[in-house]
Image (spheres, rainbow, N blue to C red):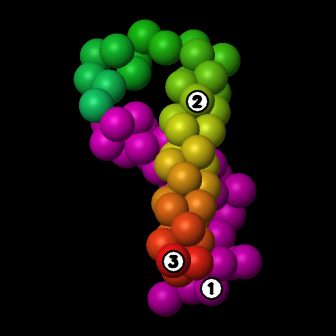
Amino acid sequence: MRKAGEFTPQETLVFSYWMVILRLLKIGITWEAIMHFTEDEINMILGITLAEEQMQSEAQVMSRTRQSMM
């Protein structure tokens, strides 16, 4: 098995591409829709999704903090 620094730029690009595709599929976007999105549209979807996840994470931390103070 190779170390992280041993991947070629092409391998890194392919890996990143498929990680994005899998992420979009995981949030419920169809393959057909993904294939028609522009790069900007994909970036916007990923940005919004990550912002939502961050908000949920912060809400969970606040909830745990309040519970531990009681």
Mark in the foreground, 1 or 2: 2
Q: Return the x and y of residue 48 as percentages of the image width and height.
A: 58, 30
Which residues are the magenta region?
1-27
Q: Residues within 10 Å of mark 1 (few under 14, many from 20)?
A: few
The mark that comes first in sequence, 1 or 2, is: 1
- Number of numbered discs on residues: 3
Mark in the foreground, 3 or 1: 3
User: Mark 2: which secondary structure?
Assistant: helix
Mark in the foreground, 3 or 2: 3
Q: Is residue 52 magenta-colored?
A: no
Predominant SS of the magenta segment: helix
Which residue does the numbered mark 2 point to in the structure image? Answer: 48
User: Mark 1: which secondary structure?
Assistant: loop
Which residue does the numbered mark 1 point to in the structure image? Answer: 3
Query: Residue drawn at (58%, 78%), measured in percent from left and top?
Result: 69
Which residue does the numbered mark 3 point to in the structure image? Answer: 70
Q: Return the x and y of residue 11 as percentages of the image width and height.
A: 58, 58
- Answer yes or no: do the residues labelled 3 and 1 have beta carbons within 8 Å? no
Q: What is the three-letter code of the residue carrying label 3? A: Met
Q: What is the three-letter code of the residue carrying label 1? A: Lys
Report how far apart the C-alphas of labels 1 and 2 lie in the structure.
Answer: 32 Å
- Whether residue 14 is visible here, answered yes or no, is no
Q: Residues within 10 Å of mark 2 (few under 14, many from 20)?
A: few
Report how far apart the C-alphas of labels 3 and 1 lie in the structure.
Answer: 47 Å
